[in-house]
Amino acid sequence: MNAAAASPLTNAPIKVLLADDEGLVRSGFKVLLDLEDEITVVGEATNGAEAVERARATRPDVVLMDIRMPKLDGIQATTQIAETHGLEQVRVLILTTYDTDEYVFEALQAGASGFLLKDAGPAELLHAIRVVAAGDALLAPRITRRLIGQFTAQRTATQAAEDRLAVLTQREREVLALVGQGLSNNEIGTELFLSPATARTHVSHAMAKLGARDRAQLVVIAYQTGLVSPNKA
């Protein structure tokens, strides 16, 4: 077992809950994940309501969540999971069809930690699960910048944005802007002549001050407040 890829809280396998109303999709994912020693599927859900229920019962590390599902869609299910006491460590990875899912911005606001294309290959799927389970956000620039930029372009209110960013130092604003552009801690360090550890500290401080659940929500805030614009990204 690769301990580095295991659950961030223990050396146990990463626990994954599959939430998709298409049985063939769930079966395909399960077959692939069952081949990995450090990943285990702890449950399946056919709709958003079941996803919330199974998340409470199994306490997974990662929920692989489809957006379009009956009874309760993936965004509503993500919101409920993020707001449920005891599920603070559960990370939601949204399944998106990229060009047609106008809901991705709302999913990030709801507490999702990233996106995965529905036609992703096996290596991409495994990488996404490991990244999100480790507490990071899956922010592929080709998805994040276009989608978030597209759906936040008209949402910025200047005074409200300034009020929200007032808690940040100038350096934290600079770091937030670079996070919003999809840069990693190493890349932020290079850009601002900081060590990766110092960049990581600034990111953590910005998350705490802005009440962001994870790095994905920092990206949303950067766009919402106009600190990063679609053209700049």
Image: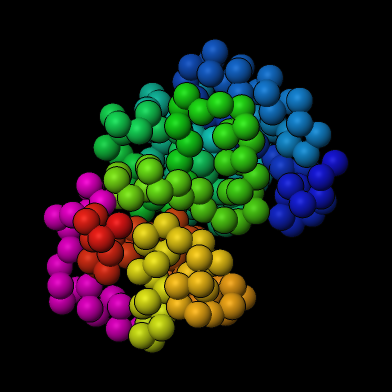
Tell me the quarter of the image containing the C terminus.
bottom left
Q: Foreground: 55 or 222?
A: 222
Q: How many marks overall? A: 0
Q: Is residue 228 visible?
A: yes
Q: Is residue 206 visible?
A: no
- Which residue is painted at 58% across and 30% down in the image? 18
Q: Foreground: 73 or 114?
A: 114
Rendered position, 209 above or below 75: below
Residue 167 place in picture, x, y as percent: 35, 84
- Which residue is painted at 46% across and 27% down in the image? 118
In the figure, is residue 214 to the left or right of 11?
Answer: left
Prevailing secondary structure of the magenta residues: helix
Q: Is residue 152 magenta?
A: yes
Residue 214 place in picture, x, y as percent: 50, 60
Q: Foreground: 42 or 229?
A: 229
Residue 206 place in picture, x, y as percent: 45, 75
- Which residue is painted at 77% across and 52% down in the image? 4
Residue 48 place in picture, x, y as percent: 45, 32
- Residues shaded magenta: 149-167
In the figure, is residue 78 to the left or right of 86?
Answer: left
Tell me the quarter of the image containing the N terminus.
top right
Q: Among all residues in the image, which is located at the extreme bottom?
A: 169
Display coloring:
rainbow
In the figure, is residue 37 to the left or right of 107?
Answer: right
Rendered position, 182 above or below 186: above
- Which residue is painted at 45% across and 61% down in the image? 183
Q: Among all residues in the image, which is located at the extreme top?
A: 24
Q: Is residue 174 magenta?
A: no
